[in-house]
Amino acid sequence: MDSIKNKTLTRSEVPVEETWDLSDLFKTDEDWRKELEAIENDIQTVTKFKGQLANAQNLLDCLHARDLLIERMVRVMTFASLRQSADGTNAINQANSALAASLASNVSASLSFINSEILALPEEKIKQYLEQEKGLKDFSKTLTDLLELKDHRLSPETEEVLAAFGEVLDSPYMIYERSKTSDMRFSSFSTENGEEYPLTFNSYAKLEESPDTELRRKSYNSFVSTLDQYKNTYAATYATEVKKQVIEARLRKYDSVTDMLLHDQQVTKEMYYNQLDTILKELAPHMRRFAKLKKRVLGLEEFYYSDLKAPLDPGYNPEISYEEASKLILEALNVMGPEYMEIIEQGLHNRWVDRADNIGKRSGAFCSSPYGAHPYIMMTWNNSMRNVFTLAHELGHAGHFVLAGRNQILSNTRPSRYFVEAPSTMNELLLSKYILNQSTDVRMRRWVILQSLSTYYHNFVTHILEGQLQRRVYDLAEKGTPITAKVLCEQNMELLADFWGDSVELDEGAGLTWMRQPHYYMGLYPYTYSAGLTASTAAAQMIEEEGAPAVERWLAVLKAGGTLKPLDLMKLANVDMSTSAPISKAVAYVGPLIDELESGF
């Protein structure tokens, strides 16, 4: 081989300015360890109220004490989690992550008495407390939501035991992530010109978007070849997660796992099915047209699953530095006003973002937002314009939770997962619209349209297909069907074939896509991406049409945090998700984008 391209650095080799500053959480590892031990000792600040919650003042004091302890615990857990995400190969990071998980399990078990004692009180008594003690007003939604769980609550002793087993019950996700970051190794591959390319989970995300068909397809073959070696282990891990949920749903007397998970999101089955059914039916024709357009423009005899993310204009791939991207994002989001922009500026310039690519780093991107501290964003920066959209997306999460944290107590900061992807996709939409309005370059306009389609592909195709697979898996599991690698691959292939029709050639590797995402270990999370994008599409159109009034409504939604159920939260932004109308409108937005691309080629 002539050379090794794009050598992946170890964490210690990464320039510090490309990493996040965890000293904002804890100055040293020793400080973190001391706080870990202090929290263990301070659990009694909450447990001292055990057996004494039949009193309005005690109830208020206990809830405040719980919030304070959880805030401290979240900081400890976030520090350990971020270290683990940055380098999963580091033995100290692995050990500290386990310590944090153990602490969380202990705290959860110790505090489980609170909900049990509250639910043991007559409903009228809780309403009386809310009237007697004004301070409880901040916890009114917490208490109301808890009462809705009354029919599904187990005995206090059982709840405490389940909470104590929290670390064990969360182990499928931990095993999945640990295997991906620490054990899974991909074979390098060579192109015809003799260049050898190493492969990681992170680097494949870039290679699958390569304009070089040989590079794209060979990286795919190497990637799925390694996935195939792990499929039975990963299937058993995921099956354990599903079995856990099936058992819990039955114990708690829910009709199904779906009912249990939707209850937690405060979403009706109608809202859930609207997202899945409407998008799968109405989006498929648009995406098949898009795939056939790519095949024609790229001159491919066969259009394979590995070609789906091939750039439609391969000769045009604008590069951009992190500094240039920061300036562009600030300009694009300026419409959101000074309060919001101050948060975004801090995020871009104060090392909230870890953008390095190193061995052991977790794949994908996320924003972690510990209450009482600033958010942390993880991504991998490779000077691509697509990175700008990813960064804007994660800054949307950061802006949301900073505003919610400033305006709400900890218990009221987090809304339902059904809404949580709306603030992030809003930023992507504003960025797209800004570039399209500013640029007179035909190719740049085409490129931005393609990036917008990438967002809709991610949220409306990738995650909806994941959501539909979950729907099938839970149905099979509840009927007693063993969830094996064969079942998962067959179900996945069937879904892909139904969606893409004859527009894409599917190989066996396509059936392994269920192994790529951690979302399957997060309940009914995948489909919520489409709900968030539906809401942000509608709200972004209002901002474009109305300006400041629509912006103020949106900021009010962000500041509301988790004080409203998702349906009411979205109505605050003038988006009604009780019908499929906004979903159909959002899907219809994709059609003209593809029309413009077709007319330009």
Image: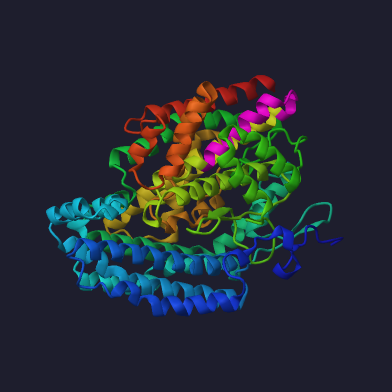
Confirm whether the magenta stretch covers residue 358: no
Residue 168 visible at all: no
Place residue 249 in its image quadrant.
bottom left
Horizontal relation, residue 175 to residue 43: left or right: right
300 and 142: which is toward the camera: 142
- In this view, the residue farthest toward the top is 599
Q: Quadrant of the N terminus?
A: bottom right
Confirm whether the magenta stretch covers residue 434: yes
- In this view, the residue farthest toward the right is 2
- Magenta segment boundaries in residue numbering: 424-444
Residue 354 visible at all: yes
Place residue 6 in its image quadrant.
bottom right
Give the residue displayed 61% in from the left and 71% down from the top: 27
Up-down: is 591 above or below 565? above
Q: Quadrant of the C terminus?
A: top right
Horizontal relation, residue 338 to residue 471: left or right: right
